[in-house]
Image (tube, rainbow, N blue to C red):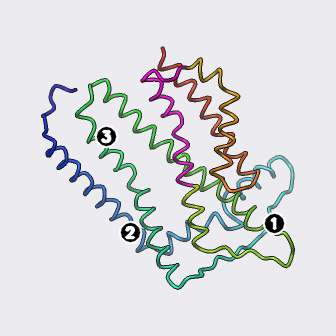
Amino acid sequence: MADNNEMLTFGGHLEVLRKMLFRILGVAGGIAFLVFCFKDTTFMLLFAPSEYDFCTYRWIENVIRGMGVDFHFAPYHVDLIATDLSSQFMTHITTSCYLGLLGASPFIMYELFRFVSPALYENERKYSVLVVSAIYALFVIGVLMSYYILFPISFRFLGTYSVAERVHSTITLDSYIETFSTLTLVMGMVFQLPIIAFVLSKIGFIDSDMLCQYRKHALLIIAVVAAIITPPDLMTLILVTIPLYLLYEASIRIVKWVEE
């Protein structure tokens, strides 16, 4: 433990924890309130991946055109409906809270680091700053991948899929927001694989030889996990499995770096 830390009683630690929680709730609540007030902008951003002219599709079209092929995605339209009297209002509230926590996540990580840092040695603090920064960076990458790639493609496939011409899809608002939130959060969490590998290697639970030996097993497990956390379509499964396996390979490099 660092020499300049003051010794706190159990009650003192609880008081520090209480103040930290209040600060976190205050910041997250403030962001959630702003999100709630700017309803039009918020839901414009949330519904953007469901549009046929979303920027991801335009980017793919431009890339294919650059190869000399005249390609366009077919337009589509999927209606969103609200089936309960209070569903739109409650969705507005829950979405604001979710985005409030998401927006406050850098501050939350900072507060958690401040809370545990007095118990760390100087060299441990150096690693902690790097770990916290990497956690947030990987979380953001996972969220962006979900928003720009996974969710739009999943929604386009599942929302327009039909077993017969007489059957038309009308997606409930609750289903849309729940799928969007779940996929976004899960992608942010599974992108923490290199951090988990770093921590496990530091405590001696795994090593690079072990990770290399079980590459094939890891690929199978990653594919199973991807199938569980994604909507049931092959394209999304592939799009999740590939980056997760690349993260596994990155984890091997990180563990080798720890071992040096």
- Identify the residue at horizontal 36%, vertical 69% (top origin): 33
Residue type, label 2:
Leu
Residue type, label 3:
Phe
User: How far apart are the alpha carbons under marks 1 and 2?
Assistant: 36 Å
Say whether disc 3 or disc 1 marks the residue closer to the N-terminus. Answer: 1
Say whether disc 2 or disc 3 marks the residue closer to the N-terminus. Answer: 2
Tell me which corner region of the image, top left, top right, bottom left or bottom right, holds residue 102: bottom left
Q: Position of residue 198 (x, y in %)?
A: 47, 28
From what the image shows, is residue 127 above or below residue 257?
below
Residue type, label 1:
Ala
User: How far apart are the alpha carbons under marks 3 and 1?
Assistant: 48 Å
Query: According to the image, label 2 marks what residue?
Result: 34
Q: Position of residue 50 (x, y in %)?
A: 66, 66
| Camera-side mark, 2 or 3 | 3
Say whether disc 1 or disc 2 marks the residue closer to the N-terminus. Answer: 2
Query: According to the image, label 3 marks what residue?
Result: 113
Is residue 166 left or right of 52 when viewed as pictured? right
Query: According to the image, label 1 marks what residue?
Result: 74
| Element carrying mark 2 | helix
In which quadrant will I find the N terminus? top left
Residue nearest the viewer, comparing 194 with 129:
194
For label 3, count other residues whose C-alpha is less than 10 Å away and answer few (under 14), some (14-19) or many (20+).
Answer: some
For label 2, count other residues whose C-alpha is less than 10 Å away and answer few (under 14), some (14-19) or many (20+).
Answer: few
| Element carrying mark 1 | loop
| Element carrying mark 3 | helix
User: How far apart are the alpha carbons under marks 2 and 3?
Assistant: 26 Å
Residue 97 falls inside the magenta stretch: no
**Which span of residues is magenta-colored?**
184-207
- Identify the residue at horizontal 31%, vertical 40% (top origin): 113
